[in-house]
Image: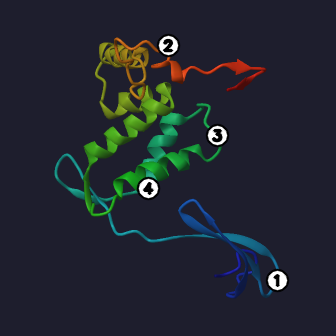
Amino acid sequence: MKCPYCGHPDSKVIDSREADESVRRRRECLACSSRFTTYERIEAQALYIIKKDQRREEFSREKLLAGLRRALEKRPLPAGGVEKLADEIEAELRRPGREEVASRTVGELVMERLRRLDRIAYIRFASVYRDFKDVEDLEREVEALKRDVARPPRAQLPLISGLELDKPASPRGRRRKVAGVQR
């Protein structure tokens, strides 16, 4: 690894730590003693995106990041949030056994993640991705988003009808509270 300060070809590793999906190494130049950090990532197998016209193009993390940054521009997102989101999407795309993914799948995955993260960013991305032709297209998407937000969370299970939750099932199940302790 060349030193970024003096260009000397040798350095020593002072510290190594795992960082998300990479290894962070703190290095010291053997010539000028300057310290710098490098990150190592495993080179994944090539992933190809199948375009609408059936062309195949190698997946570009930079294109994904550019689209996410555009959608999330000036939105309240913690530092490193865009990169973390891109990591999640890329990990989903690179599931074992996948060598090709339709561009439509990538777009839908990005929209799903943005919809959960930031509704404004979602609308921005959807307006470009779905190529809204007029204000009515935008209004329909906003109304659909409002309907989704108004629905109760899917993770919550409905109560079973007919159950009386206030009463214990049997007298044995009754417990008394004495001075804040259940007995």
Query: Which one is earlier in the sequence, the residue at label 4 or at label 2?
Result: 4
Q: Amino acid at mark 3?
A: Pro
145 lies left or right of 79: left
Q: Amino acid at mark 2?
A: Lys
Mark 4–mark 2 CB contact (< 8 Å): no
Query: Which residue lies at the image location 26% right of the left edge and 63% below the top edge?
Result: 99
Q: Position of residue 38 (x, y in %)?
A: 65, 71
Reading the image, the residue beneath label 3 is 78
Q: Amino acid at mark 1?
A: Cys
Mark 2–mark 1 CB contact (< 8 Å): no
Reading the image, the residue beneath label 4 is 61
When the figure is inspected, residue 96 is found, relative to residue 171, above or below; the finding is below
User: Which numbered disc, 3 or 1, marks the residue closer to the eye?
Assistant: 3
Name the one closer to the observer, 140 or 66: 140
User: Which numbered disc, 4 or 1, marks the residue closer to the eye?
Assistant: 4
Q: Secondary structure at mark 4?
A: helix
Question: In which quadrant will I find the C terminus?
Answer: top right
157 lies left or right of 52: right
Q: Amino acid at mark 4?
A: Arg
Query: Which one is earlier in the sequence, the residue at label 2 or at label 1?
Result: 1
Q: Secondary structure at mark 1?
A: loop
Q: Position of residue 88 (x, y in %)?
A: 46, 50
Quote the CA–CA distance across marks 3 and 4: 20 Å
Judge the density around disc 3: few (<14), some (14-19), many (≥20) Cα neighbours within 10 Å.
few
Reading the image, the residue beneath label 2 is 167
